[in-house]
Image: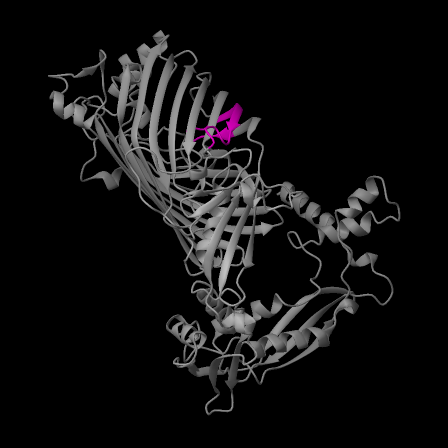
Amino acid sequence: MARYRYLALFIVLLVYGCNTTKYLGPGQKLYSGAQIKITDKDVKKSAKGDIEDEMEGLLRPLPNGKILGIRFKLWLYDRYKTPKRKGLKHFLMSKGEPPVLISAVDLDQNASILQNRLQNEGYFLAQVSGDTIGKPKTSEAVYTIQLGPQYKYRSIIFPKGGGDDLDTAVAGAANQTLLKPGDPFNLDRIKTERIRIDARLKEEGYFYFAPEDLIMKYDSTVKDHQVDMWVKIKPETPDEARWIYSVRNIYVYPDYKLRDTALKMDSAQKYLWYNVIDPKQQFRPFTFKNTVLLHPGDIYNRNEHTNSLSRFIELGPFKFVKNRFEDVTPDSAKLDIYYFLTQQKRKSLQTDIVLSQNSADYDGTQLDVNFRNRNTFKGAELYTLTLFANRDIQFGPYNHGYNIYEYGITPSLSWPRFVGPLSFHTDNAFIPRSILTFGYTFINRTQLYSLNSFNASFGYQWKPNIHVQHQLDLEDLTFVDPENITQIYIDSIHNTRNPELAHVINKQFTFGPSYTYTYTNTMEKAKTNTFYYTGKVSLSGNLVGLATGADTPRRVSKIFGTPFDQYVKLENEIRFYHKLGRNSSLATRFMVDVGLPYGNSTVLPYSQQFFIGGANSLRGFQAHSIGPGSYILPLQLAQGTAFLPDESGDIKIEANAEYRAKLFGFVEGALFVDAGNIWVLNSNPFLPGGTFGKNFLSQVAADAGFGLRFNFTVLLLRTDYGLPIRQPNAAIPIRGFKYGVFNLAIGYPF
């Protein structure tokens, strides 16, 4: 009991010491915030809450901020207030904020702003008044709102067409109008509608048209608080805004500098439908074939023009793109288009030090040295050479000392177009890429084994739109050659009788295609619900295995004297994010992964197996410590070795849910629950309970916990404490709170 009394005394002293009203002068009162009171009885509670939140966001000034109920920044300012411009006190004062007094609040101005906003949202009869409620040292503003009826559209009338081309074009935009009969009047939506119509007309050649050339007239005198709206073209709209423009010539300047003034038309080189002005011949003319989307004779289309600008930047060698339109024929509507491209440095050398944590709870430090040539063969090809070295140290209750050291080299070449057997046309803002990569990595897992890993791949990446990305690797080849295998690891294989562990130190040869599909709309921050999905299928040795009749163990096929891996692997991950409020959200994830070894393989190669548990998975369990299924490593088998192997499987099912909320400043909080497990496909007498079957749900492990996130914008540091609430095997007891797992990681788990 004594320690609770001390804690209570500490809290009282803290609150008293941070009392900010004691610094106020005579007659001064601190502004403590505002209340919004809506007097209408017929307004739904949910709608009333939304209006109150919106109105509060318009009020100025804002009261002094609080952290856990204490105005800490105000206290900091008052406590260390000084006229000096230097020193520690000035520094501390600068981190605080001056007091916001009730005398700084203009009630009439705020009431006028609120009333104007409500009228813009259809509450034409709204009335707002402001007053204050005072205490001895603080005062609160109260704004009383009488909404009245909200006016709604009865009809939206567009031009009927049949007049000039512009009338017909505006009439054609009616089908996708944002203004619908029955919707509330909203000035912001009317402005958005004008911008939408303008954007549509810009895709039909109306180069000089502007949203301001439209007038939206409404009549609010019709019955039952309704509005009739007319969409019209202003009579004073100039002739050029009524013309449909087409493209005459296109010019590209790939070496433009700000000091350049001459157009150098005498050095223009015609290529297909555009002209390249490049006296130094730094780029081959075909480089821009995928970026210049407009053609001579085309009707001007702003969407295609904007996509061209994006593609010029996506090429890689250019840091700025400037464009100019020249109205070349006053008697007819023709445009010349000029693209002025400013280059980045062609070659660069960069060194990075990266701190990371992976799903196995390895905290690592990596040094990368990257060389880039952004125009290798004068076609905007990106050549990258990466040298890297890293050290990963695992934290947890076991496997201390079995750390991982790696070094290697990765050269790659990326073409900003399709090369090779695959080629098709795309005309959006994203450039397709063909990527060739080679690599060598030396991996040393101390006291266990070393691996020499060689890899090569060739494939394509392309985006049909901002939400979807495809990646197709026609060939992804990996050869792993083990060495320096220690007795500790051999004992682990002997004691656990785990074939996956034995396969790690076998020579491994995988080759085959893979395809990844990704969809996301999480970049649309205004949406309440957003999704992320990625699916991947990987193959290895399928055709060769069929051709050679591979059937392990009866017939093992080899290439260059090495057995190759044969498998099919499917991976699926879906995430759903739901906004609960301005500073809170619900994030969920569901994963189902399956790997099928067959023919020349009985187990998946170690690098392709599935693991579960850890800081980005089931956070109440140590990384890679769960499963497969209900299998428990018998104590007698673990004797004689200091190394306990990571548990892996051919099937993985995992689900996660996390409530996220901003607490204060850069600190966020989270409550989470995780569930899942891994299983093997083929029955193994040395892994009892590890095979996937109809009772798999009874073998699902689960945890729950809480965490803090420190969001520094450029870096998010995450701490989570997870507690197991369900074990995959009933024989494993559920322990108390102190047996939970603390996770330290970078970034959100999903």
Quarter of the image for the C terminus: give it: top left
The front one of 342 and 63 is: 342
Q: Is residue 370 magenta?
A: yes
Q: Is residue 465 left or right of residue 348?
A: left
Q: Is residue 242 magenta?
A: no
Residue 415's quadrant in the figure? top left
Q: Is residue 483 left or right of residue 269?
A: left
The front one of 346 and 77 is: 346
Whether residue 420 appears in this view of the structure is yes
Considering the whole magenta stretch, tell me its main secondary structure: strand
**Residue drawn where x is 31% and y is 40% of the image:** 423
Q: Is residue 375 left or right of residue 421?
A: right
Q: Which residues are magenta?
A: 356-378
Compared to residue 702, the image places residue 602 above or below, namely: above
How far from the left and from the top, in percent, is residue 353?
A: 56, 26
Whether residue 689 appears in this view of the structure is no
How far from the left and from the top, in percent, is residue 533?
A: 35, 46
Question: What color scheme is it?
Answer: one colour
